[in-house]
Amino acid sequence: MRVKVIERCSSQDERPIYIVQQDEYLLSVKEVGERLNLGINAVRKLIKKGELDYLEVTVEKKVLNSSVNEFIRRNKNKDSRELLRD
């Protein structure tokens, strides 16, 4: 799944700025963990494995709400321990 980017432009220091759809919002790793009933380390592992789309905001990764919804749809009725195995 890709980020629904409406527009991409550059700031003065040449870092890209992403403008996403109006109804999209970002969640912290802790918030995603609460929503999925997982610890923050498990959420970070899912991010690293590419299961959740994210944006890096400063040094923290923020997960897109639509990515969490899609993850839930894709993995409904599956064992989360299987998803976290290396």
Image (cartoon, rainbow, N blue to C red):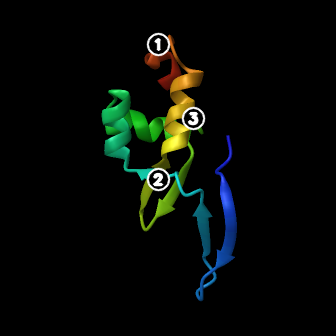
Question: Residue visible at 45% across and 55% down?
Answer: 61
Neighbour tally class for label 1: few under 14, some 14-19, many 20 plus, Cα within 10 Å: few
The image quadrant where one finds the N terminus is: top right
Q: Which residue is mark 2?
A: 25
Above or below, 48 against 85 in this view is: below
Depth check: give the residue in front, 61 or 32. 32
State the mark number for residue 79: 1
State the mark number for residue 22: none
Verify CB contact (< 8 Å) between mark 3 and mark 1: no
The image quadrant where one finds the C terminus is: top right
Question: Residue visible at 51% across and 33% down?
Answer: 69
Instruction: State the separation of the CA atoms marked 2 and 1.
Output: 27 Å
Q: Which residue is mark 3?
A: 51
Residue kind at label 2, given as amino acid type: Tyr
Residue kind at label 1, given as amino acid type: Asp
Neighbour tally class for label 2: few under 14, some 14-19, many 20 plus, Cα within 10 Å: few
Residue kind at label 3, given as amino acid type: Glu
Determine which quarter of the picture holds residue 42.
Answer: top left
